[in-house]
Image (tube, helix red, strand yellow):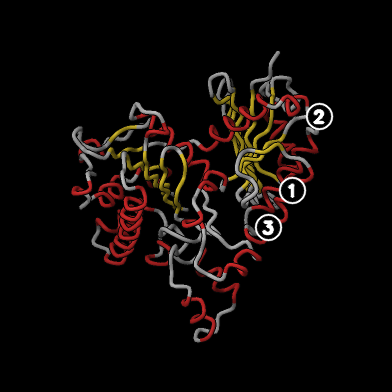
Amino acid sequence: MTPTRVLVLNSGSSSVKYQLLDMRDGSRLAMGIVERIGEGSSRLRHTPLTTGEPREWTGAVADHEAALKAVAEELAKDGLGLDSPELAAIGHRVVHGGQRFTEPTVVDDKVLAEIERLIPVAPLHNPANLVGLRTARALRPDLPQVAVFDTAFHTTMPESAARYAIDVETADQHRIRRYGFHGTSHAYVSRATAKLLGRAPEDVNVIVLHLGNGASASAVRGGRCVDTSMGLTPLEGLVMGTRSGDVDPAVIFHLMRVGGMSTDEIDTLLNKRSGLVGLCGDNDMREIRRRIDEGDEQARLAFDIYIHRLKKYIGAYYAVLGTVDAIAFTAGVGENAAPVREAAIAGLEALGAAVDPALNAVRADGPRLISPADARVAVAVVPTDEELEIATQTYALVGKNSRAITGE
């Protein structure tokens, strides 16, 4: 029997999200999350998608090893255990792969060492990703573990886009450059947008707008990323839920010299107390829109700043690409907030982009066009599926690599 299942793991600092997929048709067999790892009130929510009802329990989960063992036990209850001969591989989301990892990679000790070496440029994410990788390898040492990197899709950017205009030796010594993030989402959505248009990815130029609590934009020419808004870290670029996005770097020096703030305090300010929450106290777009409808001027200003930055990046990526075939909205805000889509595209009619109000107001699960039929540039809503993208990349690698399949 050829194994066809892939378990996708996304290990965060205090959580593990997972999905089990059958790659014969991309269907999901189970999904769930373990939250508040390391606390006495940890919670596991498990949903078998073929049989049975969702299950939930709370209790102490000491660490990621205990979390993954609990996940394995829940899967086993549905006949989907980690010891199943139908399991082909485990695919792991890894946030930062630097310049070395440009594609999915079967994990060995050297790969783990390189991911660990990248911790200084991804201190919030790579340590947790490493814990998940090491724990899964210990649980199933015979099974290929595949790392799929958020940064990989963006490694096709030309140096003119990836380089910052600082001293070259300093930049190289400290690996300072634009890496970009949300790469699995941008890869999936750009291809899905081409499919929606009935065209091959290599024939389509797409601006992808991944708008969630974290937000990023990318310019994709013929299936390859040529620019993206996030940089050395996920802080650069668009206004986000709690992150500032672009600021004058001198703001940091000013806060240190005049405000007396420490590096850690400024880091917390820009990453956790800025963006929408810093501007109006809310980072939920639904709540912000409710407040706007009630006449809240602070919420209105926050929304306007968010849209202004978004529109600037759309215009910039028009210039980078030269020709744009589609603009695709994705992730929680992009998929569900019609006012954001409408405001972001408003005024771009001269560039060939427009939103049909009736189409934009429709809520649907699948990819859809929300632009008028005669629009020169298609505007689309394309639900992202990072887990399917990770599973697809993992299975493609394992299928091509016989050594990976045998675990040698």
Give the Cα distance between marks 1 and 2: 29 Å
Q: Residue at x 76, y 27 (%)?
A: 403
Which class describes the residues within 10 Å of circle 1: few (<14), some (14-19), or many (20+)?
some
Q: Is residue 55 above or below residue 11?
A: above
Q: Secondary structure at mark 2?
A: loop
Q: Please name the amino acid that badge 1 sits on.
A: Asp
> For residue 46, which quarter of the picture?
top right
Q: Residue at x 75, y 37 (%)?
A: 69
* Quadrant placement of the N terminus: top right
Q: Secondary structure at mark 3?
A: helix
> In the rendered image, is residue 61 in sight?
no
**Which residue matches tag 3?**
119
* Viewer-proximal residue among 393 and 322: 322
Q: Residue at x 54, y 32 (%)?
A: 388
**Which residue matches tag 1?**
63
Residue 79 image point, x, y percent: 69, 21
Q: Are marks 3 and 2 in contact (CB under 8 Å)?
A: no
Residue 116 image point, x, y percent: 72, 53
> In the rendered image, is residue 408 in sight?
yes
Q: Is residue 339 above or below residue 72?
A: below
**Which residue matches tag 2?**
408
Which class describes the residues within 10 Å of circle 3: few (<14), some (14-19), or many (20+)?
some
* Quadrant placement of the C terminus: top right
* Viewer-proximal residue among 36 and 143: 143
Which residue sits furthest top? 1
> For residue 310, which quarter of the picture?
bottom left
